[in-house]
Image: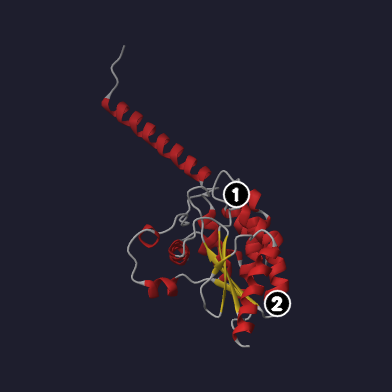
């Protein structure tokens, strides 16, 4: 048997190495839904778990998305996860009633805060960032995108790879500039605010989603236990309003 020449061995190992690189690249391409992505999919540990610069910094950074009259006497504060089935239930069946009975008539303002449960919902942080990428193009786009995420939750939640294409499709449906949206999504933009929202929720005792507080005039929030039915909100809101009337009697 003839001995292999050094040059032949070098060429063999070069081809072997190149094949491995190509295979790895193909696998990464598949896992990321068609291409390499720089999209942030996890919270910032130093914000969620580390020392923070102070409560003032946290309150300023953990900004919610509001709907309704900012001077309304009642504030409804939700901490939610777009990949959470219970949050979908609330958004689909209960929140529209709240909007109609309290938000639309100026009795309450509704404030949404992100609280992605990333341990069990791998795409929830990305979904929160996606909704804020929609918000970048105007306040009027957040809630339609919010509704798209929940109405199609079973589709993108079950994806075998990052649901970037699905989110871009929802962006197109509501009339966003898809290219700008995709640039935002394929980055770490809004990772800080979503992480800060998570930390704020933790500081307030949030340990599951949806967690919803109702408060009056900046007072202490009352946690709504029966969030899955409108009566749970009516009982809390009516009691707070009656207390106000009683105090003025």
Secondary structure beneath label 1: helix
According to the image, label 2 marks what residue?
Answer: 104
Q: Is residue 68 shown to the viewer in this render?
A: no
In terms of image quadrants, where is residue 11? top left
Give residue 207's position: percent from left, percent from top. 49, 56
Q: Quadrant of the N terminus?
A: top left
User: In this rendering, would 192 be left or right of 107?
Assistant: left
Q: Within 10 angstroms of label 2, few (less than 14), some, or many (20 or more) residues?
A: some
Q: Is residue 117 above or below residue 69?
A: above
Residue lying farthest to the top in this orientation: 1
Q: Is residue 223 above or below residue 165?
A: below
Q: Position of residue 37 (x, y in %)?
A: 48, 53
> Which is more N-terminal, label 2 or label 1?
2
Q: CA distance from mark 1 to mark 2?
A: 31 Å
Q: Which quadrant is home to the C terminus?
A: bottom right
Scheme of image coloration: secondary structure
Q: Position of residue 81 (x, y in %)?
A: 56, 57
Q: Residue 117's spot in the image, x, y percent? A: 50, 53
Q: Residue furthest left?
A: 6
Q: Is residue 168 visible?
A: yes
Q: Which mark is residue 157?
A: 1
Q: Residue at x 58, y 57 (%)?
A: 82
At a point 30% along the width and 14% down the height, the residue shown is: 2
Residue toward you, 149 or 219: 219
């Amino acid at each position: 048997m003839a001995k292999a020449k050094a040059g032949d061995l070098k060429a063999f190992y070069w081809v072997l190495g190149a094949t491995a690189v190509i295979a790895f690249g193909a696998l990464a391409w598949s896992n990321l839904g068609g291409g390499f992505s720089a999209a942030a999919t996890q919270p910032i540990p130093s914000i969620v778990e580390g020392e923070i610069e102070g409560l003032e910094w946290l309150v300023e950074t953990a900004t919610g998305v509001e709907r309704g009259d900012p001077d309304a006497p009642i504030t409804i504060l939700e901490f939610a996860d777009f990949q959470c089935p219970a949050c979908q239930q609330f958004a689909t069946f209960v929140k529209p009633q709240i909007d109609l009975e309290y938000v639309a008539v100026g009795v309450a303002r509704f404030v949404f805060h992100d609280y992605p449960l990333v341990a069990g919902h791998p795409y929830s942080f990305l979904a929160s960032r996606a909704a804020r990428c929609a918000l970048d193009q105007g306040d009027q786009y957040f809630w339609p995108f919010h509704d798209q995420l929940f109405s199609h939750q079973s589709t993108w939640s079950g994806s075998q790879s990052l649901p970037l294409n699905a989110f871009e499709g929802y962006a197109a449906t509501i009339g966003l500039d898809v290219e700008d949206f995709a640039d935002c999504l394929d980055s770490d933009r809004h990772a800080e605010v979503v992480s800060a929202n998570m930390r704020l929720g933790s500081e307030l005792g949030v340990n599951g989603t949806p967690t919803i507080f109702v408060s009056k005039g900046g007072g202490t929030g009352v946690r709504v236990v029966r969030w899955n039915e409108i009566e749970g909100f009516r009982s809390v809101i009516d009691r707070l309003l009656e207390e106000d009337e009683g105090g003025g009697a």
